[in-house]
């Protein structure tokens, strides 16, 4: 695990964005695994800005998102497909047929999940998988207790994840409680992984991921079993680590 602790939130976002841009520059036809959520909004804004400045192109890349809600259509404004269009795909030069998300609208979500796993296997491996971190240690929507070998599958979100994500929904709006997520096993098959966590709300999960036992209780601790993982934290997310506030460490 390569641990990068940056002094400010914007430094952590910039470091993670630079890592992604470097991947695209060194391999323009990279297969990228992408995440959604509040953490990634400034990352995608930075990537869009770099694209508009002519520094990076997505024209030869392929992307696979980690997850999608079950029970809403792709064109619902709350779908992760809409999130990706709004924050990234509508503003870059990626081909429309080169970005993929699970099909959360399919009434047979187990079938849709398996089809997504098969597609990743056929087109993959993913070169770089981008991850956020849930306050409960989830990666994708692999909630605590998820098997480290799990494949893409339909899952029930925990009450805490539903509560944390309620901020993205209006009070009377339908909030999905289920999702299709890449499994931990799917994520671990990526050639490399970059995880970004910012803010004090992620401090306990970051501590458990980095310094706690490798255990299903913290899904992100599975990343200890992968040989090329880059973690980007701001000082608040790193505040419960025994490490000094600003440093780069390599952990076995
Ligand atoms: C999103 C995803 C989730 C989020 C995590 C953090 O596709 O898979 O694991 O990365 O819940 O979300 P934010 O960034 O909103 O704190």
Image (cartoon, grey):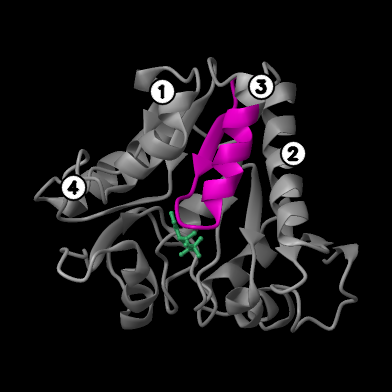
Q: Quadrant of residue 239?
A: bottom right
Residue 123: image tag: none
Marks 1 and 4 sit apart, C-alpha to C-alpha, by: 21 Å
Above or below: residue 51 compared with residue 160: above
- In reply to whether residue 29 is colored magenta, the answer given is yes
Residue 33: in magenta span = yes
Give whichever of discs 1 and 3 has the lower sequence position: 3
Q: Are marks 4 and 2 in contact (CB under 8 Å)?
A: no
Q: Give the position of the N terminus as an image quadrant.
A: bottom right
Image coordinates of residue 120 in percent, x first then y, are 42, 37
The Cα atoms of the two marked residues, 1 and 3, are separated by: 16 Å
Whether the residue under disc 2 has CB within 8 Å of ligand 1? no
Q: How far apart in space, not on screen, are marks 2 and 3 (Cα)? A: 11 Å
Q: Secondary structure at mark 3?
A: loop
**Mark 3 vs 4, N-terminal side:** 3
Give the crowd class for mark 2: few <14, some 14-19, many >=20 residues within 10 Å. some
Question: In 3D space, how far apart are the residues under numbered discs 2 and 1 (Cα atoms)?
Answer: 22 Å
Q: What residue did someone put label 4 on?
A: 111
Q: Earlier in the sequence, mark 2 or mark 3?
A: 2
Mark 1 vs mark 4: which is more N-terminal? 1
Task: Say whether marks 2 and 3 touch (CB < 8 Å).
Answer: no
Q: Residue furthest left?
A: 107
Asked which secondary structure carries label 1, the reply is: helix
> Which residue is labeled 3 in the image?
56
- Upstream in sequence: badge 2 or badge 1: 2
- Residue that mark 2 sits on: 18
Q: Which residue is mark 1?
A: 98
């Amino acid at each position: 695990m390569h641990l990068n602790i940056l002094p400010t939130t914007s430094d952590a976002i910039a470091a993670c964005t630079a890592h992604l841009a470097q991947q695209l520059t060194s391999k323009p036809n990279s297969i990228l695994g992408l995440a959604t959520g509040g953490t990634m909004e400034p990352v995608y804004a930075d990537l869009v800005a770099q694209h508009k400045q002519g520094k990076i192109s997505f024209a030869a890349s392929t992307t696979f998102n980690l997850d999608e809600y079950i029970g809403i259509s792709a064109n619902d404004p709350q779908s992760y497909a809409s999130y990706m269009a709004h924050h990234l795909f509508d503003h870059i030069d990626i081909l429309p047929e080169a970005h993929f998300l699970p099909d959360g609208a399919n009434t047979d979500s187990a079938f849709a999940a398996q089809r997504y796993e098969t597609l990743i296997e056929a087109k993959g491996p993913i070169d770089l998988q981008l991850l956020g971190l849930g306050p409960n240690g989830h990666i994708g929507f692999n909630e605590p207790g998820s098997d480290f070998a799990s494949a893409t599958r339909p899952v029930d979100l925990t009450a805490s994840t539903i509560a944390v994500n309620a901020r993205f929904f209006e009070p009377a709006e339908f909030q999905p409680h289920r999702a299709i997520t890449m499994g931990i096993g799917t994520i671990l098959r990526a050639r490399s992984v970059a995880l970004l966590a910012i803010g004090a709300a992620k401090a306990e999960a970051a501590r458990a991921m980095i310094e706690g036992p490798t255990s299903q209780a913290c899904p992100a601790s599975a990343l200890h079993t992968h040989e090329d993982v880059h973690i980007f934290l701001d000082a608040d997310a790193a505040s419960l680590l025994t490490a000094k506030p600003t440093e780069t460490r390599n952990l076995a």
